[in-house]
Image (cartoon, helix red, strand yellow):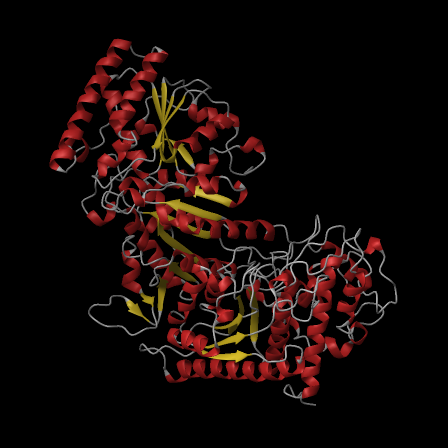
Amino acid sequence: MAVDYDSKEYLAKVDAWWRATNYLSAGMIFLKNNPLFSVTNTPIQADDVKVKPIGHWGTISGQTFLYAHANRLINKFDLNMFYIGGPGHGGQVMVTNSYLDGSYTENYPEITQDVEGMTRLFKRFSFPGGIGSHMTAQTPGSLHEGGELGYSLSHATGAILDNPDQVAFTVIGDGEVETGPSMTAWHSIKFVNPKNDGAVLPILDLNGFKISNPTIFSRMSDVEITKFFEGLGYSPRFIENSDIHDYMAYHELAAKIFDDAIADIKDIQKDARENGRYQDGEIAAWPVIIARLPKGWGGPRFDKNGMPIEDSFRAHQVPLGLEQNKLAELPEFEEWLNSYKPTELFNADGSLKDEVAAMAPKGDKRMASNPVANAGRRRGEKAPELAMASWKDFANDITPENRGTELADGSRNMDMNVLSGFFADIAKKNPTSFRIFGPDETMSNRLWDMFKITNRQWMEEVREPNDQHEGPEGRILDAQLSEHQAEGWLEAYTLTGRTGVFTSYESFLRVVDSMITQHFKWIRQAADQPWRNDYPSLNLISTSTVFQQDHNGYTHQDPGMLTHLSEKKADFIRQYLPGDANTLLAVFGRAFTERQKINHVVASKQPRQQWFSVDEAETLANEGLKTIDWASTVSENEDADIVFASAGVEPTIESLATINLINTAFPSVKLRYVNVVELNRLQNKNGKQNADRALTNAEFTKFFGESGTPVLFGFHGYEDLIESYFYERAHLGLSVHGYREDGDITTAYDMRVYSQLDRFNQAKDAASLLAAKGAISQADADAFIAKMDAILAKHFDVTRNEGHDIPEFTDWKWSALK
C-alpha cells in the first residue's frame, strides 16, 4: 500500500518522531538514570539526576523539528541526504536521531534500544568520560562538529562538490550567521555546478536569540530578509506561524515548503544535466528556507521568577535549576518531559513503538548512516587510492655540475611551478576527486600548469578577455577572496573522502588557524572510533613566505603556523620545509599517500637555486632529514667542530652560502651540514607523541653531535621553536638564526639581513662559535668577522641608496668544498 507522505496521519508520525527526539534531548541533559520514569512508573530519585547538568537546550527542538522533516523528505523523494548542524552545542540532535533510527547502536552496541541502553546514553552525554555537547566525531552521521561557529555552509558546499546525488540538509544558526565566514559562505551559490555537484539546502534556523542578545536577522522583517537572499541569488521561503504552540500547523507548512524546495532542486539539476542550462553565467535560484522556530521551543515557558524561558535567551543552556542536590524544580522537569507524551512513543522496555520507528529511513538512507559522512564510503570499505604517476617524472635533473645554480629553463627554478606539473597530472587522472582550493592565489602561487588543463569553477558570467581561466567546470576553486571559505571547502571535501590542496600566503594562513585546529581535533577524535573510516590528509601550502616578501612588506610576514601546529599532538601533524623543487615534489609524493594527517608544507614560488638530486630528495622527504655529504667535510660518524643545519628554502640557501664562506676561510674546520625537511622529526615531547617519527636520542646525536657541539641552525620560522626541540633533547650549543619579527618593504636579501638569517651574520656567529671551541684562533675569528661587517656595511649602503642587492648575494653560486 502506497504511503501518503502528505496526509495528516503521516505528519502525526513526523510529530511523534519529533517528540521522541525532544524527550531524549531534554532528558539526557539532566538524568543519568531512570530515563523513562513515566513509561516505567518509576519516580525520579535524587541519584537519578546528574550532580551538575551540562548542556544546551535552546537550539535543540528547532533542529530536531527540521531533522524529522528531513527524514520525511528522504522517504518521499528517495534522497541521499546528510545533516549539517550549524547552531552551536546541538549535539543531542544527531545523537538522539541516530539512536532512534538504530545507527547509534550499530556503532556502539552497548547503547541498546531499551531502557538499559538509553540509561547508558543519558549518562554519557556531557559527562566525564562520555561525549560532548557538539556533533563530534563520536556521533554517527556527523562531519561538521560546529564547535567553532561559522562554517556549516562552507562545509556543506565542500561535501557536495563532485557528489551529484547528495543533498546537504544544512541548518545555519542565526547567531552563527552573524560571523564573517558564514556571511561569506552565502556566496557559495556562485560556485556550485548543478550539472556535476550535489545540492545544498540551507535552512536559516531563526530562533531569535544568541547567548544573551537577540540576533540581527530575528529583528528583520520577511520583506527585508527576502530582499537580502534574493540579492544573493537565492529563492527564499519561510516556515513560521503566529501561534508557536500550534505544532501541527508548523508541520503542515514545513512539509509544503520542503517539498517545493526539493522539487526546485530537482528541476535545477534536471535542467543542468539534461538541457545544459546554468553553464553560461546564469546562476540557479537555489532555495533557501528561513525557519522561525523559537529558542527553547516546547520547553519550560517561565522561570521561578516569572521571566520567560521559551522564546528567549534564557533557554540557551540548561533551562531549569534542577540538580542532584537541588530538586525544587523536579515537578517542572517532569511536566516538561511528560508534555512529549512518552507513553505514546516508547514501550515499557524502552524500545520505540513500531509506528514511530517506521518513520526512520532505511539502511544508508538514514542520515546518520550516509557513507558520505564517514569518509565517503561504507564502514570497512577500502578507501580508493589517488591515481598518480611518480613525482620523479616531474623532477629537475640535478647534478654536481648544476647544483646550487639557477637552471637554464627559468620556470624550473620556481618550486611551486615545478610542483604544478605534478598536480595537473593528478587532476587529469582524478577528474572527480582532486581539487585545488585557495583565496584567489593559485595564479600568484605559480601553479601555472593547472591552468593548462582546467579552469577555475565559476558559475557567474565570464567576460572575455578581461576574465581569465573561469568557467562552470574546473578543478580549481579560488575565485572567492576568503581563506575561511577555501579552508571550509577543503575540510569537507577531505572529510567526504576526496583529496585537495589549499594554497595560501603564509601570513594569512593564520586567518584560519583555529579552523585547522578544529579539523585536527576532529581527526584526533575520529581516530579513536573503530567504526569511523580514515580520511585523506588535509594538505596546506604556505607560500609568499616571510623571507620573500620584498614587495608586500611587514604586514605579510608571519611564519607562526609552524609554531601553532607544533603545539598539537604530533601523531596527526606533518610539517615540511622542502629546500627546493625536487624535495617539494617528493614531499607531496609522500603526503598524498598518508591518511588522517594535517600536512603543512612551506614552499617557495620565486626563482631559486636548485640543490638536491632525485635520490637525495626522496631520502629527505621520507626520512625527514639528511646529512648532505657534498656540503660536509666529516660524516655522521665523525666528530664535527660545528654542525650547520637548515629548514626552509631561504635558510638552506643562506646556510650553504655560510658553509662556503667558512670553508674558504678555514678549510681545516671539520663541519657537517644537515638539511631538515620534516620538522617534527626533531620534536621529542619526552617520547609521549609522534613515536613513529621522532628521532631517537641516538639518531639525534648522529646528526647534531653530543651536547655542547656547536649547531648553527638556519630556520624559516620563530627561533624559539627550534630552541624548544633542542632543549627537549638536553642539547646545548645551539644558535638559531630564524625570523626575528622585524621587516619592511625592501629587497629580497635585505629581508634576510633584518633577521640576521643572512650568510654574513651566520658566518660571524660561526666564527665566534669556532673560536670559543678552539677550532680557530680568536685573532683569525676577529679578522674574519671584520670582513663580514664590511660586506654588511656595503649591503646597507647599496640597498638604502641604490635600492638593489649587492653582487655578493645576486652573483653567488655554490662551490665545492676544499
Q: Quadrant of residue 314?
A: bottom right
Near-viewer residue (806 or 408) = 806
Task: Tell me what residue is drawn at x 40 percent, y 61 percent.
Answer: 435
Measuring 70% from the left and 74% from the top, which residue is drawn there?
Answer: 17
Front one among 490 and 744: 744
- As drawn, is 309 to the left or to the right of 79? right
Q: Position of residue 480 (x, y in %)?
A: 35, 62
Q: Residue 474 or 136: which is nearer the viewer?
A: 136
130 on left or right of 654: right
In the image, residue 724 sits, relative to residue 334, either above or below, namely above
Task: Name the quarter where the N terminus is drawn.
Answer: bottom right
Task: Judge left or right: residue 337 versus residue 644.
Answer: right
Q: Residue 718: x and y, percent?
A: 39, 35
| Residue 11, image quadrant | bottom right
Residue 662 in the image: above or below residue 360:
above
Q: Residue furthest left?
A: 802
